[in-house]
Structure formats: C-alpha cells, structure tokens
Image (tube, grey):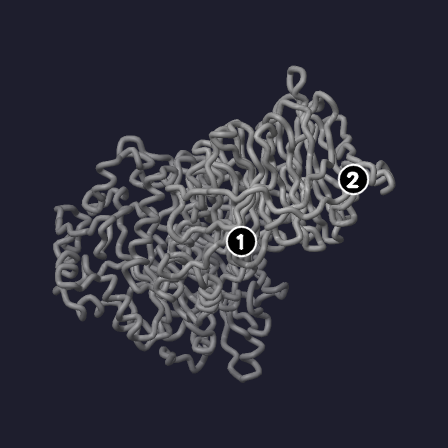
Amino acid sequence: MEVNDVRRLLLTYAAMLAVSTALGNMVLATEPLDIGTSTHTPRGAASLDQQARIATDPKIHYGFPRLVRAANGNLLVFYRVGTSHAYDDSRIALRHSTDDGQKWSAERILWKAEPGLSAHNPVALVTPSGKILLWVSAYRYSSKPHARLPGYWSESLDHGKTWSPFVRFDNDPNRSVYYVTDAIVASDGLLIAGDVHPAGGIGDCHTLLFHSTDDGRSWSVRSGLTGVEENKGDEVALLETRPGVLLCLLRDRQRKEIYRYWSRDAGRTWSTRESIRDMLDCTLQRPFLTRVSNDAILLSGRDFGRKEVVAFVSRDGGRTFAERRTIESYQGDGGYTAAARLDDSSVRIVWYADSRATLNMPDVKSARLTIPARSAEDGAPAKVEQLRAQRRKLAHRQRRILFDNDGNEPVYLCNEATREALLAPRTTPLADTQVDSIFYCTWSSGFSLFTHATKIGQVFTSKANPRDPGNTVGGFSKNLTAEFIAKGLDPLRVMVDWAHEHDKEFFWSFRMNDTHDGAGAWYSPHVLPDLKKRHPEWLLGNPKNRPKRGKWSAVNFGREEIRDLAFQYCEEVCQNYDVDGIQLDFQRHYVYFKGPASGRDANDDERSQMTSLIRRIREMTEQVGLKRGRPILVSIRVPDSVGYCRAMGLDVERWLEEGLVDMMAVSCYFRLNPWEVSVALGHKHGVPVYPCLSETRMSDAEAQSLRASDAAYRGRAMAAWAAGADGIYMFNLSETTRDIFKQMGSPASMKTLDKVYTTGARGVRGANSWLANGLRFLNRKVVSPESPLVMRPGKTSELTIDIGDDMQALEREGSLPRVQLRIRPVVEMDPARWSIRWEGEPLQEGRRVENWIEYSVDPRLVRRGANRLALAVASEGNKEVKLNDLVVWVRFPQSVSFTSP
C-alpha cells in the first residue's frame, strides 16, 4: 500500500528559500540551569553537566523538542513555540549547534499551522544520504470535537539550512496519520511509527509502521503494531538492537501503561505486548531510545506521576532498564526528551520543563548526560561483552555425557552424614567415565523443598515412615539432610566441590514445578511443602477440585508470587554456590498455568509472564557472573516440540532468539519429533542441544527389559549422535557403574559394540496427560506395546527407524555387522503372511524366534539416519492385525562389553 510519493508535490528549492531565514550568529545559551539531585537518582547513576536553556521566555510556551545530528556534524533541535500546551496557533522552530550543544544559533521559524490548528510534535530523521526529513502534527483545537488531522512533512538537502514547503504526509482518505512518533534508520531502510486515527481525526487511535527503501521518497505500511479497536496508538520509541531485531516501547495513554514489543523480522510482525511499568516504576510518557554504545541503551522521557524528567540505562540490549537518573522536576508541564550520541559514554539530551516562577510556560533545556562504566563491585556490567563472549565459549565446551542426578542420596541412600557416604552411591563412580557435566537436583520434590541450605525455600528434614503397602524403602527414616547441613556438609556444596576437583562441569538443576506431592503415593503428603499449605490459592487445584491436566499440587506461575520465588531460589544458589550453571527443568513437571490445567492451551499473556521470568534469571546470572568474574550458564530441559512448549506456556523459540539460554536438553516422558528437529532449532541460534535419554517405563515386561539394556542405550545414543547432537543427556539412570557411561559419549567408543534400535524407548501417550490433545504435536510414528501398529489387510504401513551406525565406513574397515529386524505381532502368526521392504528392497521371508519374527537385512541397505520401512500383512478373514513391537539389532562378531573413555 503506497502512502504517497510527495516528491511530485514538492516545489523547487527556490520556494524553499521563502520559508527559510538567514542563519543567525552563534550565541551562548541564555543562562545556566540549576538542576538538583532527586531521591530517585542512585549513587553512580548518569551525571549531568553543560546544563543550559536553549529557548526561554516567561510569556512563551516552548515544548516538545526533538534533536538530531546532521550529516555535517551539526546538532539540530526542533521545538514548538506557542502560548499553551496545545490550544493556540503555534509554530515549529529550529536552532542548530556546531559544538555538540554548548552554543546554539538564533531561533528560526520553519512552519506555522493554519489558523485554528496547533503545530505540534516535530520529529526529524537524517537519512543515509544526509537528507533530513521532518514531520509535524496538526491539532484542531479551535472547534469541538477537537481533531487530530493528518500531519505534514518537509525535507532539507543542505543539513537544515533550507527546507521544502510542508505538505501532507499521507493522503489516504480512510485514515489520519496524525503524529509520526518516532523515525529511525534500520538495516533494510527507513522505519517510522505513526499514531493513526479515523478519517477526520476524531476517535480511537492505533499504531502503524511505515517503511521506505528509497531514502524516504515513498512509503508503504509494513505492519500494524496495535489494532484499530485496541485504541493503543499514541507515542512509540523504536530502536534496532541488531540487524532485523527491533525494540519498540509504546506509551498507552488510555491504560496509563508502557508496553514493550519485539520484532525479529525487521518490523513485519511483533511479539505480544509486555508491560515494563513495574520495571521502570512509572508510566514513561513519550519514551525515547538512544544507542549510546555497544553496551548501553538510554531510555528517557517523563515520569508523569512524579512530574520528573528521567532517564534509564539498559546494558543487555533492551531486556532490562535500570540506573534511573532524574534529570529535572517540573511544576505543571514538562518532559518529552530526545537525545543524540556524543561518544561511547555520553549524549546531548534535550527536554522542556517549567518552574514555580514560570508555571505552564516551560523552557527548552539541554545538558550533557554521561553514563558511567559500571564496575563489578557496583553489581552492573563493566565488562559484560567479555563475560558474554566467555559464556558463549563455555556453552560449546565438550560435554560427551551429561549426568542428571535427582539428589536422592541424603534422603534415602546414606547411613552416615559424611562426604564419602554422600558421594559413593552415584558420584564417585563418575570419575573415570565420559561424563563431563553433572546436573544435580537438590530434590525440589514439591516447589520450595530442597536438600541444600536454603534460607528462602524449605529444607526437607522429614523422617516420616508411614505404614503403606507402597512404602518399601523405610520411608524417610534415613533422611540425613539436616545432619549433613549441621556438620557443614551442605550436599550441594559437596557435589560442586567434587565435580571441580575432578575437572567436571557442575549445574544446579531446578525442577520448576515438581508435583510428586500431588501424586497420591505414600510419600506425597510428606513432601507437600509448608508454602503450599499456607497458600493453597497459589496452586492450580486442590485434592477435591483437581485440574483436568497435571496434578492439583502444581503451583500457578500466573501468580507473581510464584515467579518471584522461582527467581529467588535461582538467585540464592547463584550467589552462594560455585556452580558453572543452572538448569531450569520444565519437565518436572509440565503444567504451569491455569489455561493448560483447565484443558486449553496457554495464551500470550501466560507465555509472556514466563519469558519475563527467564529474562530476570538471565540478567541475574550476568550480574552474579560479573561479580565473581566467571559466567553462569543457563540451561533448559523442555519437550522437543516448539508447539507443545508454547501450548504449555513456554516460548522456547523466543528464549533462543533473545539469547536467554545457553544450552538445551530435550525430551523426557515422551518424544514428539525426530532428534534432528531440536538440533536444527538450537543450532540455528548457536545453542548446543542434548537429547535426553530418560529411563524406559514400558508396562510390557519384555519391551521394558529390552529397552533398559546397555545395547538399547547404545542404540539410542548412536542415533542421537547421528542426528547432530552435541552430547548425550542421561536422566533417571542412577547406576553409574554401568559400562554405558564409558561408551555413549562418543560414536567411536560404540562403533563396534552391539546395539538395539527402536522407534521409541519411551511411550508417547503421556503427552496427553499434561496437555489437552498433546499428541497433536506428535510428528513421528512409534511402534511399541503401548502404541501398537494397526495393520489392515491389503494396506501398506510405512514408518522410519533411525540407525546411528555408518555402514559404509564399517565396510571399508572390514567390520560390517549383522543387521536383524524383529517384529512382534500381538498374536503368533506365520512369517509367510508378512512382506517387508527396507528402503524399497524386499526382505527375505522371516523366521520365528520365540514370539518374534526375525529378518536378515543387508547392512549395505542401512542408512545412517532415518531408514524407510514398508510393512504389509495378509490377514485371515480380513481382520486387523496389531504389531506390538519392532526393533533392529546390530550385532558385531567381536563385540566387547567395555570400551575405555
């Protein structure tokens, strides 16, 4: 949609001279300012100097300044000249400075609105060619109802000396683009935000983004930031944080809010709005964003409630704003800042403000604002880019096997409270294995319950031993957590120290919403934390009113109290333990919000709440990392489907895009996609991906035994490596003396070992237990006793099975294995009734082996990766046949049971 090509309307520059006046001599600002320090200005915040008034007269209202740097280096300040805030025949003026704002030229009037209209809101943009574009607003104040009429614009080709006649910017008869609230140069052209009203300028507003690729000669609508019915036009600040990524802040006049939006596609689409009012502790009117340096973004505007002109600094690309600096207080009218960069640590900032002596007749003022480098002692980044570079390097360190320990040792497994007793069951055997990283969960069996020395959560000290048929372990009678802590042997600290002594990476794993306390088992009432007893309103249900999905004891992350506690638990560990990273485990368990608990998918607000929490945690890890001089990585463990995660309330793709996480482990109770899907997602954003090989839980004894074997674990690991995995994540497998911990960390160390491949070591039906119709996200075919393949006579069923062995390489080395496909029908059948093709090639008739039918497969047919199978069966009486299981054995004649790391 073309806005208008106004070049045909612009007159020659002879006409421009008619609206231009001769430049005045440079003059000193009329008088210095006396700006006090507010109680909202913390020690170490940005400092002000070179303070001056640019335009001042006790009988004139000067306001709405806008500042740009011309291509010749001059600063230009545009502002409104009138007798009131908006209800007079006002004018738009210009001054310029050749010394970065210390002296300013005489005032020139550029535009005077027609009688009955108020000239307003000058916004300027210097294009890459050096041309200056200037937009102004026209507000009809002289008759009611007042109207916000289409705005005007002009251009200068000589750094602001002369200007073309002002003409309407947008001639679309169906709308009134009243106010261009911000204008920026982006990596793919020019972008402006327009405050748009209905035709005639009366009624609700919305915000449109306009784009130009020809230096501003023509414009088209790129996107709508807000809808017509939302009435959320008003003032917008734009900044491109990196190529194609846009930060937008919008002040919502109707709701007295300030919202943040992100675009990852150069402004074509936008994220759900997110309020930052609480972060700023104010609704910032006409926000203005300035890139000061690679590390610092300045946000300025007016705090309308406190009547203060304020500025904030972001040092993380716009995710958080802090370091509030009050620039000046005003009495009746003030604010509307703009800034231009001077160097990597300072800007020239302009604003307007009145005083008690000049009430409602403000002056336009300016100052140099210097943003200090922050030291680690101040708790803010002085070397944040170095920290992030170090973190990126650490994120890609070698992790052959990542071992997840659920932290049961101090509760169940120790006979005495000694370091040796704590380490012996699971940790000591890891010394000479391929495990490079330990993920240790200090229980969290019920949100807030831990086995480390927490001051914010609750230490689990119960020794209850209830009489219950399910209690076969003596209950919690052996729980020595309190004894360990009393002796100075905090289990978490012991584990961290051991890992570092053995040159292994250590993560604290936080189960974000563990609900063992709602499982109805013998232990459940004893692991229900005090927090949930005190605040049942913070839960997603109760024993009498259970949610449709998940357990009643899950906490509701829609509540700010819960999100704050989750943050504090992570912060406490980062501040008090020498961890290399923290993991946010979203698969213990899966329900976080009321929507999914009630049977519907999470909505944008719920996802936004969780994303805000992840941002807070990322920011905190950076602050703590700077203080200690070493990064803290953030890992997540999530389902292997972006869609499933979004439906849960986890916007994983957004987290990756924003750089909020460093690594990702995927899958647990169920796997929904081939491993390649998650690998591609993570690698797209520079994040390593670790397929999670959870313990198998098949109810069928034979299927369970086979899938729990070392050969099956090797098959799972080999297939994951073939899919591009960066390592193998082991979950709920505590027998660390097994040989597989010395084998699975490298394809080379498994190359000539026997393997079993299946279409799924875990079931998939659990996907529906935690999310309504969760199986809609299943993108692979699974054959197991839990999910048998239904065969119809005369119909061919197709599926794939992933094989990790490289048969071509093995053949070159003279090590080709035997490959055997086995199928297990629900009932015994004559093998002759089956026909199977492997990669299009028919297999010879199978033979019965106990309750299986076995086929020999030429290993040269086997691909590394997905292999296509086609199965057909001739059924007696045209009846359906169910296939209970399908596995592939890869057997080597010289296979050994042990390979050194």
The x and y percentages for residue 731 are: 35, 60
Which residue occupies the foreground of this view, 111 or 439? 111
Q: Going 13% across and 47% down the picture, which residue do you hit?
A: 466
Disc 1 element? helix
From the viewer's perspective, tell me whether residue 711 is left or right of residue 483: right
Between discs 2 and 1, the one toward the N terminus: 2
Q: Is residue 226 visible?
A: no
In the rendered image, the vertical position of residue 23 relative to residue 394, given as above or below: above
Residue 208's place in the image compared with 529, above or below, is above
Q: Is residue 160 left or right of residue 737?
A: right
Q: Which residue is mark 2?
A: 20
- Mark 2 or 1, which is nearer the eye? 2
Q: Residue at x 66, y 40 (%)?
A: 78
Does residue 314 appear to the left or right of 740 in the view shown? right
- The amino acid type found where label 2 is placed reads Ser
Q: Which residue is mark 1?
A: 657
Residue 547 place in picture, x, y as percent: 35, 35
Q: Residues within 10 Å of mark 2 (few under 14, many from 20)?
A: some
Q: Is residue 418 above or below residue 122?
A: below
Secondary structure under the numbered disc 2 in the rendered image: loop
Quadrant assignment, res 509 = bottom left
What is the three-letter code of the residue carrying label 1? Glu
**From mark 2 to mark 1, how far is it between C-alphas?**
48 Å
Number of numbered discs present? 2
